[in-house]
Amino acid sequence: MAEMYIDEESMRAHGCLIHRDSESILAHWELSGKYMTDIMEFCIPKRVEFLGQPNATVMERLAKFEEAGVVVAMAPHFAGFSRF
């Protein structure tokens, strides 16, 4: 799932992406990479919130956000279920 929410008045956008696992995230990044480069020309990321336990490859990519000054917040999964 990928949803975007835009508040034009405050010039803020929020994206909500739900992935089943780290491999799904990596596949998404691979497919969307060429488009995101163009989009990011107009965006200044401030914060990335990550819910769950990503694998080492995803963590390496998230570290690049931190290196660029973006706040990366993590919360490990505690309980629940999914209907994927």
Image: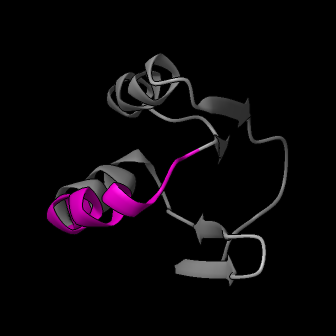
In the image shown, does 23 or 72 lie closer to the viewer? 72
> Which residues lie in the magenta part?
32-45
Residue 66 seen by the camera = yes
Residue beneath the point at 28% across and 55% down: 29
- Would you identify the image quadrant in which residue 16 lies? bottom right
Residue 29 is left or right of residue 79, and the answer is left
In the image shown, does 78 or 26 lie closer to the viewer? 26
| Quarter that holds the C terminus | bottom right
Q: Is residue 33 above or below residue 83?
A: above
Residue beneath the point at 57% across and 66% down: 18
Q: Where is residue 49 in the image (x, y as percent from the top left)?
A: 68, 44
Residue beneath the point at 40% across and 62% down: 42
Residue beneath the point at 32% across and 28% down: 57
Q: Where is residue 23 in the image (x, y as percent from the top left)?
A: 32, 50
Magenta-colored segment: predominant secondary structure: helix
Residue 51 seen by the camera = no
Q: Where is residue 72 in the image (x, y as percent from the top left)?
A: 63, 31
